[in-house]
Amino acid sequence: MKPFTYSAPASVAEAAERLAAPGARAMGGGTDLLPQLQRGIRRAGEVVDLRGAVPAGILAAGQGVRIGAATRVADVARDPDMAARFAVLAQAAGAVASPQLREMGTVAGNLCQAVRCWYYRHPDLTCWLRGGDTCYAQVGDHRKHGLEPGDCISVAPSDLAAALLALRAVVTTNRRESFPLADLYRKATAGDRSTIALDDGELVTAVTVPEPPDASAYMRAGERAAWSFALCGVAAARFGGEVRLAAIGVSNLPRLLDPADPLAGLPGLEMTGWKRRLLETLTQDALAAVG
Ligand SMILES: Cc1cc2nc3c(=O)[nH]c(=O)nc-3n(C[C@H](O)[C@H](O)[C@H](O)COP(=O)(O)OP(=O)(O)OC[C@H]3O[C@@H](n4cnc5c(N)ncnc54)[C@H](O)[C@@H]3O)c2cc1C
Ligand code: SF4
């Protein structure tokens, strides 16, 4: 691991100033960032620990809730109001990783975590998403990758993203008051290989769910019940007669699905056709759960 400096600013303004410097990296719980630095697949000049700078905790906001960016995933999972009114989010939070990782990982860190593609994480490879020329997954093993063709076929890993997308959540940063969660993500391009749509010096401060759904549920399949990323996760939230469905594990970004045609635009790749059946089944289960 290359040496880096560490800072723990006490305000959003100071954190933003530090993050505007070249090579500065935001850190929540560090459960994704630090292993990447340790493996040498990412570099940092300075690691800026945001836990003393951005809010933590879950507050009422009108009919909905505002979740501070530094709120730990475990606190979302065990909040009684969350379980009662925003079941899909509590269920998704409770499914993340393991108890230890949920105690360390923050909401913003979970939403902004990097993809888990084994080529991306390999210290001796520089794949397309990390700035190279080749998507090794497409010429190699992509059994657990996406159903959507593209330059990068890795999948969105965040369980919270699926739940929050279904719940019509909006994101607040130090520069923007509120924008739809979907806009936190972008397709990587040849000129910008990042899938997170934040500018230098911009950091997530909160996520707000404007109103509770009438019913909601999270359906997920992993290789194990715990300590295992979702092969596919489907969140459903019903607001009156409208059902919003969102999935992770199937495409490059967290994806809204059409309840009438959830597989639309997801043809499957040479090794991932099996996931279409999984997505279909989880979607049926999620729709049944929200009535
Ligand atoms: C073995 C294992 C299994 C896992 N299984 C799952 C799983 O099943 N489901 C799942 O969803 N996740 C899973 N994870 C991922 C884990 O949940 C994330 O590592 C964790 O949520 C990241 O949170 P963090 O606060 O530690 O992020 P960090 O590691 O601190 O940061 C992650 C990224 O977010 C950025 N970031 C952090 N805070 C902010 C902010 N406020 N504004 C802007 N950018 C920010 C950082 O710069 C970094 O790029 C797993 C991880 C491991 C190691
Ligand atoms: S799928 Fe994406 S992350 Fe994986 S090797 Fe290809 S470009 Fe890299």
Image (cartoon, rainbow, N blue to C red):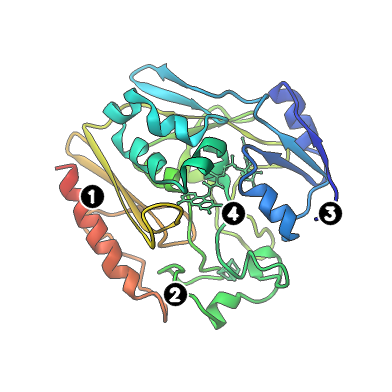
Measuring 72% from the left and 60% from the top, which residue is drawn there?
A: 39
Sooner in the amino-acid sequence: mark 2 or mark 4: 4
Where 91 sits versus 38, above or below? above
Measuring 27% from the left and 59% from the top, which residue is drawn there?
A: 262
State the SS at label 2: loop
Residue under label 3: 2
Sooner in the amino-acid sequence: mark 4 or mark 1: 4
Measuring 31% from the left and 39% from the top, which residue is drawn there?
A: 88
State the SS at label 1: helix
Measuring 61% from the left and 70% from the top, which residue is drawn there?
A: 119
Residue 218 or residue 180, whichever sits in front: 218
Q: CA distance from mark 3 to mark 2?
A: 32 Å
The percent coordinates of residue 289 (x first, y second) are 18, 45
Rate crowding at label 4 as few (under 14), some (14 to 19) or many (20 or more) other CA atoms within 10 Å.
many
Query: From the Cβ of disc 2, is ligand 2 less than 8 Å away?
Result: no
Q: Quadrant of ligand 1?
A: top right
Q: CA distance from mark 1 to mark 2?
A: 24 Å
Sooner in the amino-acid sequence: mark 3 or mark 1: 3
Residue 181 or residue 72, whichever sits in front: 72
Q: CA distance from mark 4 to mark 3?
A: 19 Å
Q: As shown in the figure, which amino acid type bears the numbered disc 4?
A: Ala
Q: As shown in the figure, which amino acid type bears the numbered disc 3?
A: Lys
Residue under label 1: 286
Indicate the quadrant where residue 202 lies: top right
Residue 143's mark? 2
Residue 2 or residue 272, whichever sits in front: 2
